[in-house]
Amino acid sequence: MMVRNKQSEPLAEMRPLIDQEHLQSCITEIARMILIDFANGHHSGHSPVIVVAMKSGFMFAADLLKALNQPWPVVFAWPRQDGIPMVIEGETLIRGRDVIVVDALMDSGGSQKRLHAWLMQHHAASVRFAILLHKTVDPSVLVPVFYLGFEVPDVRLVGYGLDEEQEYRGMAAVHTWWQQA
């Protein structure tokens, strides 16, 4: 699939990596695992709080929340320019509760590590990550990923919430992307 970017040059080459059917099947399985983990009561005595890592996590989170079909609270984490995560709303919901962070992509793990530290500083009972796509770039960064969709190669990815200069987020599948010379 050849697509022109905003500047109309150079051409971007995209190839499908994970189609919509495989994404949905994987998300259904992740939801099943989460429901099993929290079926026998919650570690904190409350339902877990879902924290959606914005912006890339929104499509994965929407589909995962529909698959979970639970009345659990949902809050949103936005990265700040200084790299410190900031939860926009519901900060008080986190205290003493189990947290499931939903994010589309983990590559270096740096942003997830900062978000984990921030959540623990705000007294989350526990933090678990649900990551749809994982690139094993820096195995030294330890993040509690309990729910993992796909291991992917260290290539540029777009679609299904992932962008290139704010474009391509709405594509239903995950594609690889690179600049042509």
Image (cartoon, rainbow, N blue to C red):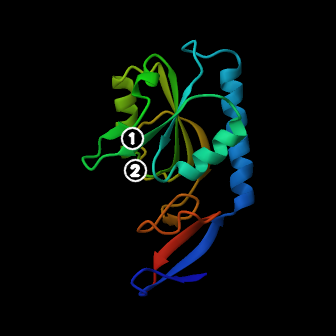
Look at the numbered disc 1 and give the secondary structure of its residue. loop
**Which label was assigned to residue 108?**
2
Picture residue at 61% right of the left edge, 28% below the top = 72
The quadrant the C terminus occupies is: bottom left
**Image point (46%, 52%), residue name:** 55
The image position of residue 2, as x and y in percent, is 57, 84
Rendered residue at 48%/61% (across/down): 154
For label 2, the crowd category at 10 Å Cα-Cα, with few meaning under 14, some 14 to 19 and many 20 or more, is: some
Q: Indicate the secondary structure of the residue bearing disc 2.
A: loop
Residue at the outermost left position? 82
Crowding at mark 1 (Cα within 10 Å: few <14, some 14-19, many 20+): few
Alpha carbons under labels 1 and 2: distance apart: 7 Å
Disc on res. 141: 1
On-image quarter of the N terminus? bottom right
Q: Residue 65 location, x and y as percent?
A: 64, 40
Say which label, 1 or 2, has the lower sequence index.
Answer: 2
Quadrant of the rendered structure where residue 152 is?
Answer: bottom right
Q: Amino acid at mark 1?
A: Val
Residue sticking out furthest to the top: 45
Marks 2 and 1: in contact by CB < 8 Å?
Answer: yes
Observer-nearest residue: 111 or 61? 61
Q: Nearer the viewer, residue 139 or 90?
A: 90
Amino acid beneath label 2: Ser
